[in-house]
């Protein structure tokens, strides 16, 4: 019932936003023109592709479902920017009603001006989406120096590589992921840490592409450790866990492991476990009690809530993802308002906090306003 209510609300918002854009688009087109006749078919065909693709994936995974998912995913990004453009134009129209702003030659040729604005908006959004997609294909390496003022049984330095929000599936497939793995391995990490949303909900596209064999290529002397994200729970936590574990990852599920007798890694279950699995995760205090805080303790928690609580409990470093820093500008303003840290590095009390943009994408294969990233942590241990 909760899922049906949630899906109904999302579908209502999606349809309403598309209808608003559609009505404004129709008003901009010349009456009786061929483009106005074709516009409803093209518009609503594009608006339906994401829903059709996701439905087809559940029924029969194929090249047809891939086509609809890819097309619909691009439409999600286009829809956001068409919506922002239409809202902006309506604000201009509202102001014009009270205070004349537009020059007289625009008002004298108002019907033509509407078509010019329509054409310019469509072209601008297409260019923006193409540039944003190209941006997703080239992750940057973001290097962060971390000093933890504790001894680690003689270990003085750790080269840790962190990935979050890969979202393996139809959109982030084997080819793209293989390039990410090559980039990670070129950094010669001592340890690799995955901060959740490794999979993008449905496991079937991962199985079809045999992405697990590419996952096996992630290798580091001290191991590859990960936690579950909300998308693993949306798609089914237990099958996701078994798949990841069987392909070389050590998944920490409200558990703690001591590495090289020098430092601890604590991995939390995702915050949305209770919503999707009906079971609550361990309190953070219980995880802290499983460690000896005289040693460095690294916490991996997919969603960057409760950073202050982790700092008070004596964790030295928290690694998170989830936010994508909005992925599409200006949604970064929303994530910045919600989270203490939406991206990057921040010192909270004596604890270091790092939140990654993510290296993959969810929904649109588009990033605007931020880069996909691999985070390389140069961690030094010394009192």
Image (spheres, rainbow, N blue to C red):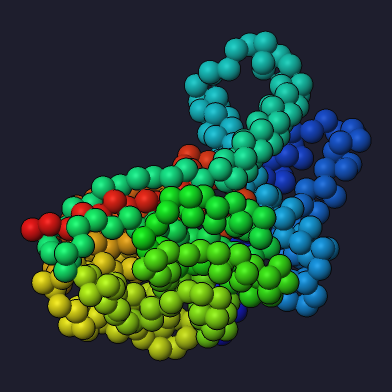
Residue under the point 13% across and 64% down: 151
Q: Is residue 52 above or below residue 366?
A: below
State which quadrant residue 56 falls in: bottom right
Residue under the point 68% across and 49% down: 74
Dividing the image into 4 quarters, which one contains the N terminus?
bottom right
Any part of residue 294 in sight: yes
Residue under the point 67% across and 16% down: 106
* Picture coordinates of residue 241, whole percent (x, y): 51, 81
- Residue in the foreground of this view, choosing between 376 and 20: 376
- Residue in the foreground of this view, choosing between 196 and 309: 196
Any part of residue 195 in sight: no
Residue under the point 8% across and 58% down: 383
* Picture coordinates of residue 34, whole percent (x, y): 91, 35
Q: Is residue 367 left or right of residue 26?
A: left
Q: Is residue 115 above or below residue 1?
A: above
The residue at the far left in this view is 383
Q: Is residue 325 left or right of residue 286?
A: right
* Picture coordinates of residue 358, whole percent (x, y): 46, 55
The residue at the far bottom in this view is 279
* Picture coordinates of residue 382, whole percent (x, y): 12, 57
State which quadrant residue 250 falls in: bottom left
Q: Is residue 149 left or right of residue 213?
A: left
Looking at the image, how many numbered discs can be counted on the residues? 0
């Amino acid at each position: 019932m909760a899922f049906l209510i949630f899906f109904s609300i999302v579908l209502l918002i999606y349809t309403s936003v598309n209808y608003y854009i559609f009505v404004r688009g129709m008003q901009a087109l010349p009456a009786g023109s061929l483009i106005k006749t074709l516009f409803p078919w093209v518009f609503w065909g594009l608006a339906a592709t994401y829903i059709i693709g996701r439905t087809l994936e559940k029924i029969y995974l194929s090249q047809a479902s891939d086509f609809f998912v890819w097309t619909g995913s691009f439409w999600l990004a286009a829809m956001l920017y068409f919506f922002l453009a239409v809202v902006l134009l309506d604000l201009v129209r509202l102001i014009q009603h009270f205070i004349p702003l537009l020059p007289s030659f625009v008002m004298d040729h108002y019907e033509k001006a509407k078509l010019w604005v329509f054409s310019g908006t469509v072209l601008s959004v297409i260019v923006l989406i193409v540039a944003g997609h190209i941006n997703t294909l080239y992750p940057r390496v973001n290097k962060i120096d971390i000093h933890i003022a504790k001894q680690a049984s003689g270990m003085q330095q750790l080269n840790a590589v962190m990935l979050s929000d890969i979202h393996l599936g139809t959109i982030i497939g084997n080819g793209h992921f293989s390039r990410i793995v090559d980039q990670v391995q070129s950094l010669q990490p001592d340890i690799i840490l995955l901060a959740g949303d490794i999979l993008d909900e449905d496991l079937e596209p991962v199985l079809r592409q045999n992405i697990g064999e590419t996952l096996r290529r992630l290798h580091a002397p001290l191991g590859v450790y990960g936690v579950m994200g909300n998308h693993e729970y949306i798609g089914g936590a237990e099958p996701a866990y078994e798949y990841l574990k069987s392909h070389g990852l050590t998944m920490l599920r409200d558990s703690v492991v001591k590495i090289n007798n020098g430092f601890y890694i604590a991995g939390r279950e995702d915050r949305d476990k209770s919503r999707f699995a009906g079971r609550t995760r361990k309190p953070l205090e219980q995880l802290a009690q499983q460690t000896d805080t005289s040693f460095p303790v690294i916490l991996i928690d997919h969603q960057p809530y409760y950073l202050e609580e982790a700092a008070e409990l004596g964790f030295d470093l928290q690694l998170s993802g989830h936010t994508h820093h909005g992925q599409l500008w200006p949604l970064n303003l929303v994530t910045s308002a919600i989270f203490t840290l939406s991206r990057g590095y921040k010192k909270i009390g004596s604890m270091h906090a790092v939140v990654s943009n993510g290296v993959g994408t969810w929904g649109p294969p588009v990033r605007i306003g931020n880069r996909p990233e691999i985070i390389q942590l140069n961690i030094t241990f010394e009192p």
